[in-house]
Amino acid sequence: MKPARLSARDVLRVGAVGLRTRPTRVFLSALGIAIGIATMIAVIGISSSSREQLLRQLDRLGTNLLTVGPGQTMFGEEAKLPVKALEMVERIGPVQTAAATGVVDTSVRRTDRIPEAVTGGITVQAASAELLKTLEGEVRRGTWLNAATERQPAVVLGSEAAKRLGITRTGVRVWMGDRWFSVIGILGPMTLAPEIERSALVGFPAAEKYLDFDGHATTIYERSTDASVEAVRAILPQTVNPENPEEVEVSRPSDGLAAKAAAAGAFTNLLLGLGAVALLVGGVGVANTMVISVLERRKEIGLRRSLGATRGQIRVQFLAESLLLSALGGVVGAVLGTLATGGYAFSRDWPPIVPPWAIGGAIGATLLIGTIAGIYPAMRAARMSPTMALATT
């Protein structure tokens, strides 16, 4: 006699019946798989969303911004950029726009009653009129420095500086040096120049007149055409300081964002390891559920064997149950992980990104876990003798 065959539909139906009879245990076992899958997808999704946000910032801000600063002299002392350094940079052919800032040795305070030592981490800097254009920044409130206000006791606050001073509008005054300065503007965020966010900016002429500034720039920002960035970078030290080019340092702020994106990927690997541990624990839970199921259903196994079911069909039945249980947890985990990614991305104003390969990997992981977890219980069920199984009380 030929044994009866089970179609794929029959296998799924028989496997699902075994799960429906124990809903609480199935829920708890699937929850372990779901937590592991949700963790892995959320980690990948949040990391991908963060990386996409950084790349969009790079596309928007450009990678053609270079900064020039003083290095050290041969005796280890801090060097200074020449007073005419900005003019020299502007003479380079491919340079589209350039601006400079210079640190002023004073503090900015809300009133003259606050001790001078209390700086709040805010730096006072002289700034040239082209700074906002070069950094592609924006003024949230008020106006930027112009030919008139850069000579007057007027100040523009970076976004973080304004927050630390408790200033939310223009027209108020702050104490700098030994006199009052009027706040004429508050800037928005400066992704490629975060030091500007923590600064109070005055014009070069006003800094020299009212704050004893020596006129030496401490940072020069320049933008050139994309194709000529590296060429300009190579000649900047000799252009800025022909006598001592080794005392000039050149950097590209966008490299920091690119490095940050790479670091986010490295951190993702660590969190993926934690998700894999959770997934492994869920797999152990599935295996435990299936072993207990075999022990509890000995009479069912014996009855099926006595009615003609082969050992292979018994193995397929319990393996199908394990795969269905794992797949249930995987689907729920994928949905939870995607929702977590979307919620976190929207809260940070990031583009929500869940790579398709992450979903595919989650499905593959659940099938693998289900197969591994179900092999031993399925083989154990298939080895049972029909007589001994029916005789079990």
Image: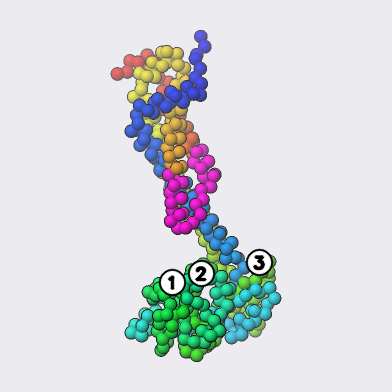
Amino acid bearing label 1: Glu
Q: Amino acid at mark 3?
A: Asp
Q: Name the N-terminal-most of marks 3 and 2.
A: 2
Q: Secondary structure at mark 1?
A: helix
Q: Earlier in the sequence, mark 3 or mark 1?
A: 1
Membership of 363 in magenta stretch = yes
Q: CA distance from mark 3 to mark 2?
A: 20 Å
Tell me if 87 is positioned left or right of 175 in this view. right
Query: Magenta: predominant secondary structure element?
Result: helix
Q: Quadrant of the C terminus?
A: top left
Residue at 43% across, 53% down:
344
Q: Amino acid at mark 2?
A: Met
In the rendered image, which residue does mark 2 sit on?
Answer: 190
State the extent of the magenta-drawn residues as a range.
336-364
Of helix, strand and loop, which one carries label 2?
Answer: loop
Q: Which residue is mark 1?
A: 160
Q: Residue at x 52, y 58 (%)?
A: 53
Q: Is residue 68 visible?
A: no
Q: Which is nearer the eye, 147 or 62?
A: 147
Question: Residue 29: x, y in percent?
Answer: 38, 36
Residue appearing at x 59%, y 86% in the figure = 83
Label 3 secondary element: helix
